[in-house]
Image (cartoon, rainbow, N blue to C red):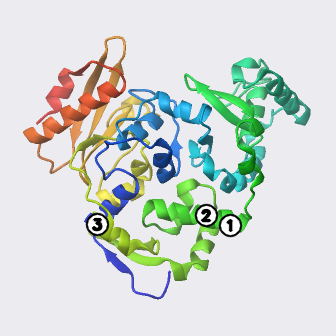
Amino acid sequence: MTGRAPLQISNRDARRLWLDAQGLAATPTGKLDLDGLIQALGFVQLDTIQVVSRAHHHILWSRNQNYRERMLNKHMAEHRLVFEHFTHDASVIPMAFYPLWQRQFRRLEKKVRGWEWHRGMLDAQGRNSIKDRIRKEGPLCTKAFDTKVEGEKKMWARPPHKLALDYMWYAGELSTSHRENFTKFYDLSERVIPEDLRAHTPSDEDQIDWLCRNALDRMAFGSEGDIQRFWAAVSNSEAKSWATRHAADLVPVEISCADKSTVCILAPPDIEDRLAKAQAPTSRLRILNPFDPVIRDRNRLKRLFGFDYTVEMFVPAAKRRWGYYVYPLLEGDRFVGRIEVKADRKAGQLNVLRLWLESKVTWTPARAEKLDAELARLARFVGLEHVTWTDQAAADLP
């Protein structure tokens, strides 16, 4: 922190800044600039679960409802405008950022070498034989190989070819060429990543500076820990050292939290200009994905919005407080509840299973109309014709 007095930011303004920085303030309409949208977010997390629409599609649709599910794979496979790699989880990242990702390849290669479940990984000769096949046959998925797990089959045990593919993907030797029904196809990186981007290797210090600066830029404000966690491509000590080196350029801010407490953190140099220009969030009611970047950091979510949210798909059913895949409801700058919905594609309908309102939220006809409109939009997005409320969901209404 610098010696200057921190800039005071109210809780309402902090929420406005955060939603604006993450693309959820504006009404999600208008011409779609998919590349610009992903660059503004920094990355989009990938997830296999498809209760309605997979997380990456839902996240993009929430910011522009002209987005369609087929667009992302085309963006990667045909236009080569994004690549896949690991932030805090598997993600698509703008291709333009590739040179700044070199240290992440090295960090994850080193980490993967130490993972217990990679002991059965193929040796260099075996990995080279995989690359030779890909070189001759083109992009391949794991089903193209047939090595087996040897010895005791533990929960996370994987066949040697899968371990080798993972290792080479983490290390940047292989890249995702495309996906078919979410199955990943691996290709040689030199056939996926443009040569000029592969040849450009900024210094480690420049990469750290870019990663930290761009993390803070996309958050509007944050602690050193927030900066580190954004990409998960620098260490805590690296983020702290960066903040210390650039203290003269950063603005200390005091954020008012939802519980009336305050927290002193950092903001970019243009924070006052951002405060003046950040638009008020649309009053539209939004059904957000559980993996949306605004939701992802649960501590930040609770601090700013007073919204206590947990993902429970990996919690045993008997221990769940809410449900398997429950979506937060955002109205303006306030989380007003959560909803459990599920697509029934055979019946062509979106089923509303449960609805929970936050305390002190009054269920008005106007709010009900907003939710019905958003449910109808979500159903159309995934090609469903009807929205159906179960008896239990209807009983949840006050």
Foreground: 271 or 164? Answer: 271
Q: Residue furthest left?
A: 365
Spatial CA span between label 2 and label 3: 26 Å
Q: Residues within 10 Å of mark 1 (few under 14, many from 20)?
A: few
Label 2 sits on a secondary structure element that is helix
Q: Which mark is residue 13?
A: 3
Residue contact at pointers 1 and 2, CB within 8 angstroms: yes
Foreground: 207 or 47? Answer: 207
The location of residue 348, given as percent across then percent down, is 31, 15
Q: Callout 3, which amino acid?
A: Asp
Q: Callout 2, which amino acid?
A: Trp
Q: Residue furthest front?
A: 31
For disc 2, the marked residue is 210
For disc 1, the marked residue is 206
Q: Does label 3 or label 1 sit earlier along the sequence?
A: 3
Judge from the rendering whether residue 339 lies leftward or rightward of residue 195; answer left or right. Answer: left
Label 1 sits on a secondary structure element that is helix
Residue at x 32% of width, y 36% of height: 322
- Locate the C terminus by quadrant: top left
Residue at x 65% of width, y 64% of height: 208
